[in-house]
Image: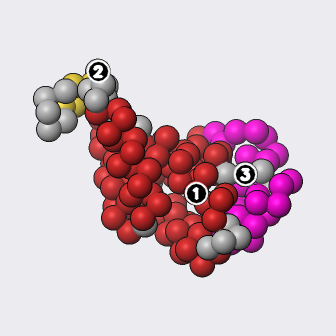
Amino acid sequence: MISDDDGHAENLTFAEQLTFAEQLAFVEEMANRFGPIRDAFVNRRQEFETEGLGVPVYMVLADTASWIERSSTSDPMGVSRMLDAFDSAYTSSGVSIRALIGVGLVESLPGMWSEPGRNVWDLAGSNVRRLMDVYAKQGAIFGKDLL
């Protein structure tokens, strides 16, 4: 079991505890660097902690993807900086963080057939672009796609 500061526990296996802790630390690090991620993190934490649940890291990144879509034309430099940070993290991280980026963020980005999707693709680094291509071709990102 993993417990938060309030003594709430979630029934997770040891491997799941390690994965969640690593993913939560990553999202917190990104939230400290980027205001839109911080806003999503704070909102989701408040929403879920009232129910005694942990922060839904995948939902935080899905919310972040919505911001990226909305901001790809109004703040392309901000979007580019954020996507570069995700791209760098993907390169330097293990499968847990790669899965979070792929499933939590990339699968929530707009499709490349749309104008916002093309804008995001143009601003993204090579790892995020590759995952966007994979998602467009097969409709999901699988473990084999994260290696």
Residue type highlighted by circle 3: Pro
Position in image of residue 118 (x %, y %): 79, 63
| Residue drawn at x 52%, y 68% as measured from the top left | 82
Q: Which mark is residue 112?
A: none
Q: Amino acid at mark 1?
A: Trp
Which of labels 1 and 3 is toward the front? Answer: 1
Write down the residue under mark 3. Answer: 110
Q: Residue at x 29, y 33 (%)?
A: 49
User: In the rendered image, which residue does mark 2 sit on?
Assistant: 11
Q: Is residue 107 above or below residue 88?
A: above
The color scheme shown is secondary structure
Tag shown at residue 67:
1
Q: Is residue 59 left or right of residue 49?
A: right
- Tell me the magenta residue range: 113-142
Is residue 20 something one can see in this rendering? no
Camera-nearest label, 2 or 3: 3
In this rendering, which labeled residue sits more in front, label 1 or label 2?
A: 1
The CA span between labels 1 and 2 is: 32 Å
Alpha-carbon distance for marks 1 and 3? 11 Å
